[in-house]
Image (cartoon, rainbow, N blue to C red):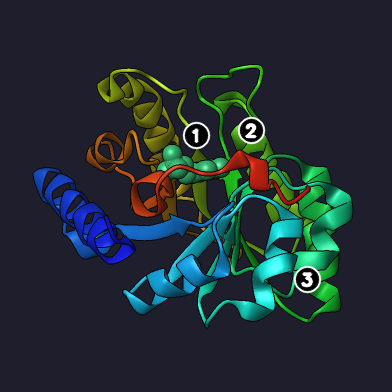
Amino acid sequence: MAIKDNIEYVNNLKKVAAETAGRKGEDVLLVAVTKLHDVDEINEAIDCGITDIGENKVQEILNKYDRVKHVKWHLIGHLQTNKVKYIIDKVDMIHSVESLKLAEEINKRALQHNKTMDILIQVNSAMEESKFGITTEETGKLIEDILEKCPNIKIKGLMCIAPFEDEPEDAAVYFREVKALYDEYEKIDHENLDFKYLSMGMSNDFEVAIKEGSNLIRVGTMIFGNRDYAKKQGN
Ligand SMILES: *Cc1c(COP(=O)(O)O)cnc(C)c1O
C-alpha cells in the first residue's frame, strides 16, 4: 500500500480511538517515525500532510536533515550527552530525557543557541531492564531538579514505551500509570513547565494508548512498512 493510504488509515484509527475516549482525532498528534527510511519516503509523507517526524539516532538526523522538506523533528531515542550539540539547533522536541546530566547538557547547548528546548521526560513504568527511562518514583525528583537547574529547558510532558504485548490491550496498565503521573505533574505551576504532550503509543498499541490518554503517537511501521535493519546508519 502507498504511504498516502497508510497515513489515511492511521489517521482514521486515531480518530476512532480518540472519539471512543471522548476526544477529537485532531487532538492527538501523529508523529511519523522515519528511522531507517529514505528521504524520498519521508518527503512523500510530508506531502501527504505529515507535520512531525521522529528519529531515534543523532547520526541519522544529520544524514537526512538538509534533504528533508520543512517539518518538525522529534528525537525519540536514547540520546548520549556528547551528541546533544549536534542536534540542539535541529530538533523541535526531545522525548527521551531521563537524567539530570542529559538535561544539563541540553540546557547548556540551548543557552549557547539562545533558545529554549522543549523536552519530555521518558518514564519506564514497566521498568524493563533493556529499556531506557526512569521509574515513576524518580520522575518527580527529576522534574524538580530540571526546573531548578535548567532555565533553557521547557518540560512539555511525558513519554513512555510500553513493553511489546501480543495483546495490545495488555499495555493499557502501563499507559494508565504514566497518564496518572501526567495528571499529577501537569498541576505544577512553573514557567518552565507546560504539560501539553503525553507521548505514548506505537504501531502495535497506539489505539490503546489513545484510549488511556495519549495525545501524541509515534508510528513508523504502519506508515512506511517494515524497517530494513541492514540499512542501519550508525549511532
Ligand atoms: C521505532 C520507534 C517507534 C515506532 O515504532 P513502530 O512500531 O514502527 O510504529 C516509536 N517510538 C520509538 C521510541 C521508536 O524507537
Q: Residue furthest right?
A: 82
Label 2 amino acid?
Gly
Is 66 or 38 nearer to us in this picture?
38
Is the CB–ligand 1 distance for label 1 below 8 Å? yes
Q: Are marks 2 and 1 in contact (CB under 8 Å)?
A: yes
Label 1 amino acid?
Ile
Give the residue drawn at x 42%, y 59%: 31
Tell me where residue 139 appears, x and y as whole percent. 60, 35
Tell me where residue 116 appears, x and y as whole percent. 68, 72
Dot 3 falls on a residue whose secondary structure is helix
Is the CB–ligand 1 distance for label 2 below 8 Å? no
Q: CA distance from mark 2 to mark 1?
A: 9 Å
Q: Quadrant of residue 98?
A: top right
Residue under circle 2?
Answer: 133
Residue under circle 1?
Answer: 161
User: Which comes sooner in the sequence, label 2 or label 1?
Assistant: 2
- In the image, which is nearer the foreground, mark 2 or mark 1? 1
Label 3 amino acid?
Ala
Residue under circle 3?
Answer: 110
Is the CB–ligand 1 distance for label 3 below 8 Å? no
> From the viewer's perspective, is residue 66 above or below residue 181?
below
Tell me where residue 79 appears, x and y as whole percent. 74, 48
**Number of other residues with Cα within 10 Å of mark 2, as a class: few under 14, some 14 to 19, many 20 or more:** many
